[in-house]
Amino acid sequence: MMAQTLYDKLWNSHIVREEEDGTVLLYIDRHLVHEVTSPQAFEGLKLAGRKLWRIGSIVSTADHNVPTGEIEAGIQDPIAKLQVDTLDSNIKEFGALAYFPFQDAGQGIVHVMGPEQGATLPGMTVVCGDSHTSTHGAFGALAHGIGTSEVEHTMATQCITAKKSKSMLIEVSGSLKNGVTAKDLALYIIGQIGTAGGTGYAIEFGGEAVRGLSMEGRMTLCNMAIEAGARSGMVAVDQTTIDYVQGRPFAPKGEHWDKAVAYWRTLVSDEGAQFDKVYRFDAANIEPQVTWGTSPEMVVDVNGRVPDPAAESDPVKRGGMERALQYMGLQAGTPLNEIAVDIVFIGSCTNSRIEDLREAAAVAKGRSKAANVSRVLVVPGSGLVKAQAEREGLDKIFLDAGFEWREPGCSMCLAMNADRLAPQQRCASTSNRNFEGRQGNGGRTHLVSPAMAAAAAVTGRFTDIRALN
Ligand SMILES: CC(C)[C@H](C(=O)O)[C@@H](O)C(=O)O
Ligand code: SF4
C-alpha cells in the first residue's frame, strides 16, 4: 500500500460515500457546540421536526458571551444573556453527551474544555461552528471549523459534505531556545508563510521542535493554523498525546483503552508519505515574537523594529503596512521594546491552559504591574484550569502582582462580552487575532506568548523575557 499521510488516514477512515468529483460525505465523531453558532441550527432542526442524529457526539459549553467578572450576578447584557439561555434550553430539549453551562465548574472555552474532558481523542473527526476548532488537531484528529448550516447538517445527519484539501508538512528541526514557546513558533511560521500560506491545505506540524512540545503547546500551534489560512492543523500521535488523554473523564477505559492506544499509535504519517507542499524551519532561528500590525503575519522579533513601508516594493503590501501603522499608532523604525502597553490580556483558546498560566506566573512572581499598565486580565480557559491554578497558588501570585484573576471565558479575545479595549488602548494579548477592532473598537492588539505578556505587564513595555531571567 502507498505510504499515507496522517491526513490521508484520518480522511479515509471517515468516508461514508464518495462522489466521482471527489466530494465526500464525511462522518463526524465529535461535535462541539457553543452559544454563538448553534441557535439557528437548533432552530432549523425544530422547524423540520428533526432530532439529533447522535446525541452522544455533542459536547457543549457557553464561552463567547459569558462575563468573567462577578458571575454570581448573572449576565447583565440582554443579548448575551439571551444567547446563553437559548443554548441552555436547546441542550435541555435535544440532549448532549455533556454540557457545561455558564456558572458550572466545568464551563470554559470550548477548545480548552473539549481536550481537558477527554472529549477530543486521537483519530476523531471533530467539528464546531468555530474557526479555532483546528486546535483539536493537536491530538492527531481531523478538526476544523464549520458554518452554521453545516452545524445543522451535522446535528441532523452526523456528516458533512467536504472535499479533501491539499497536504502540507511544516517541519521544525532542533529545539526551541529558552524563553521561546509554541506561541512564538506559531507566530514565526505565520510571519514566514503568511496568513494565506496555508489556504487550501491541511497542515501537519512535525519535526523535533514539535515533538518536543507538550500537548498544551501543540494545541497553541494547531489553534493558529487557521491564522495561517489552513482550516486544520495536526500533530501525529506519540507518547505525549497518549499520556495527556489517559484518565480524562471521556477517555476510553480498561480494555477499550488498550485497543484505542494500539490504534492511535498508527496515527502518524508513514515513512515516505508525500505532501503537496513542505516547509522546513530551524528552531534555532526563532526568537520571542511580537506582532506590530493588524494581521498575525505582521510580526517581528521582540528585539526588532517596526518595519518601514517605504522598504516594501509591493504596492499592495506597502499600503497595508501604512494603514496598519496608522491604526496601531506606530512609527516605522521604532524598536519593539520601546513600545509601552496600557492593558495586558492573558487568556483565549490559544493560551489559557494551565501551562500557559504557569509560564505567566513564573514571570509575575515577586514582581508587580508597571505603573503605566492600567489592567492585567488573567482569564483561565476553563473552570478546571482555574481550580488547578488555584491549587498551585498561581492566583495569589497574579493578585500579589496587581493582576486580575477572572472567571473562564473568551473574554477580551474578542469584543463579544464586557471585557474590551477602549479606542486606542494598546494591549499585549496572548490571543490569536489582531484585526482592527478585534478586542474593541479602535483597540490596538499585539499578539505575544503568555510569558511575554507577563513581562510586558511588569515592565510596562514589550520586553525580551530572557532579559528578565
Ligand atoms: C464566534 C466564532 C464564530 C468565531 C470563530 O469562528 O472563530 C470566534 O470564536 C473568533 O475567534 O472569531
Ligand atoms: S477564545 Fe477567542 S479565538 Fe478562541 S473561540 Fe473564543 S473568541 Fe474565538
Image (spheres, rainbow, N blue to C red):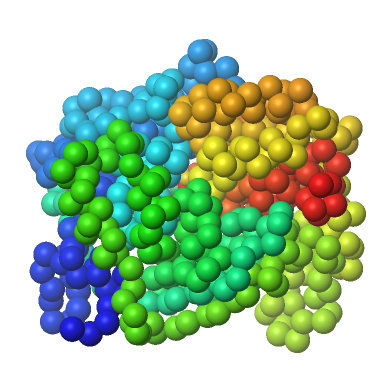
User: Is residue 129 visible in the rendered structure shown here?
Assistant: no
Left or right of 451? Residue 200 is: left
Between residue 187 and residue 355, name the one nearer to us.
355
Between residue 265 and residue 438, name the one nearer to us.
265
| Position in image of residue 39 (x %, y %) | 31, 38
| Position in image of residue 457 (x %, y %) | 79, 39
Q: Report the residue at 68% width, 71% height from top.
A: 284
Quadrant hosting residue 368: top right
Question: In this view, which residue lies farthest toward the top?
Answer: 73
Q: Report the residue at 38% width, 47% height from top.
A: 243
Question: In which quadrant will I find the N terminus?
Answer: bottom left
| Position in image of residue 61 (x %, y %) | 37, 33
Against 424, is 165 above or below?
A: below
Left or right of 232? Residue 420 is: right
Against 166, is 454 above or below?
A: above
Between residue 215 and residue 93, name the one nearer to us.
215
Left or right of 53? Residue 100 is: right
User: Is residue 56 visible in the rendered structure shown here?
Assistant: yes
Left or right of 67? Residue 105 is: left
- Counting every numbered tag in the picture gives 0
Q: Report the residue at 71% width, 28% height from top.
A: 398
Q: Report the residue at 59% width, 76% height from top.
A: 281
| Position in image of residue 187 (x %, y %) | 63, 63
